[in-house]
Image: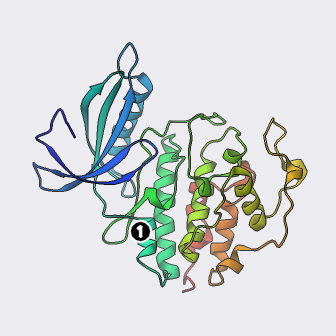
């Protein structure tokens, strides 16, 4: 791996591949600390680096300056070599040892209700921060939620996530299928509610220790969703030109989330169902979720 400032970082090993690039663990030679290097390939235009990429990096720096406790810290941006019409860039982040998927695997006996509440609140806190800064993550999943050695959440992999305007239709491939909101599966315009849907799926996973909707195609994913949240009424189905029709779904043997997670408390169930709402306009916002009874009630059922 070649860097313009190769004397600063020494790559140790590859630790993952995200939607926007490959991630390596590396050592900062100045401090001796481990860092995470995200290698991103940026297509060049006749004018050099595209303006939208420059805007996204500028946005990352602005968010970083606010130093939110539930957002992974951006430490540096390095230019690597140019290969034909592409430039290699390295985004240098603080290194966090594990993601939420690994954390769940390492806790096969599950988590206490209080721990689930704390983890959930930190996820929503991070998302509320992004949304209040006009950023939609679009790829929330356990692999993009990092867990520090003392059990705190930090959101990662939202770099180059695109700032949004409401009802803007983003064209690039987003969100792992299992955590996709119905509007994304149907190819409709979307905004911040897609992140809320993903959080609802993740909170259920904290209770059940397995993914809630494991679909193989967009249609199969919707079938699995409707088996749990119920099939929407025909008048709720989007009138726009969607590829999947309302009458192609036949829900049999509907299952409730509190049947999948028998130890879930009523307020957690209420919060999750307000997130897993078919109509994105009726979905709870991150700020509303932080004020939900699940986070304010005392004592919490354990």
Residue at 11%, 49% in the rendered image? 29
Q: Quadrant of residue 278?
A: bottom right
Residue at 51%, 73% in the rendered image? 117
Q: Position of residue 135 (x, y in %)?
A: 50, 41
Residue at 44%, 26% in the rendered image? 52
Q: Quadrant of residue 223?
A: bottom right
Q: Which corner quadrant holds the C terminus?
A: bottom right
Residue 192 vertical position relative to residue 153 in the rendered view, above or below: above
Q: Quadrant of residue 102?
A: bottom left
Residue at 50%, 66% in the rendered image? 121
Residue 30 vertical position relative to residue 200 in the rendered view, above or below: above
Label 1: state its secondary structure: helix
The residue tagged 1 is 102
Q: Position of residue 128 (x, y in %)?
A: 51, 52
Residue 155 vertical position relative to residue 132 in the rendered view, above or below: below
Along the viewing direction, whichever of 236 and 83 lies nearer the viewer: 83
Residue 181 visible in image: yes
Q: Is residue 97 left or right of residue 262?
A: left
């Amino acid at each position: 791996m070649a860097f313009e400032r190769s004397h600063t970082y020494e790559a140790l090993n590859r630790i993952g591949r995200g939607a926007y690039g490959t991630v390596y663990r590396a050592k900062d030679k100045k401090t001796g600390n481990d860092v995470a290097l995200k290698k991103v390939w940026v297509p060049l235009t006749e004018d050099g680096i595209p303006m939208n990429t420059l805007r996204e990096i500028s946005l990352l720096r602005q968010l970083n300056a606010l130093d939110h406790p539930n957002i992974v810290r951006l430490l540096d941006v390095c230019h690597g070599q140019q290969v034909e019409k592409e430039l290699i860039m390295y985004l240098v982040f603080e290194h966090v040892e594990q993601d939420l998927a690994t954390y769940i695997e390492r806790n096969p006996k599950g988590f206490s209700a209080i721990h689930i509440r704390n983890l959930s609140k930190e996820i929503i806190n991070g998302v509320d921060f992004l949304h209040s800064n006009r950023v939609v993550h679009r790829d929330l999943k356990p692999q993009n939620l990092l867990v520090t050695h003392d059990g705190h959440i930090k959101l990662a992999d939202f770099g180059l996530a695109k700032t949004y305007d409401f009802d803007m239709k983003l064209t690039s491939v987003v969100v792992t299928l299992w955590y996709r909101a119905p509007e994304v599966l149907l190819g409709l315009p979307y905004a911040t509610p897609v992140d809320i849907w993903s959080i609802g799926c993740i909170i259920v996973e904290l209770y059940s220790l397995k993914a809630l909707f494991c679909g193989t195609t967009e249609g199969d994913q919707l079938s699995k969703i409707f088996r749990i949240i119920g099939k929407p009424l025909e008048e709720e189905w989007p009138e726009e030109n969607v590829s999947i029709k309302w009458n192609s779904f036949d829900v049999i043997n509907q299952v409730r989330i509190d049947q999948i997670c028998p130890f879930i408390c009523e307020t957690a169930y209420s919060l999750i169902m307000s997130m897993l709402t078919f109509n994105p306009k009726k979905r709870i916002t991150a700020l509303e979720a932080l004020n939900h009874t699940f986070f304010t009630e005392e004592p919490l059922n354990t």
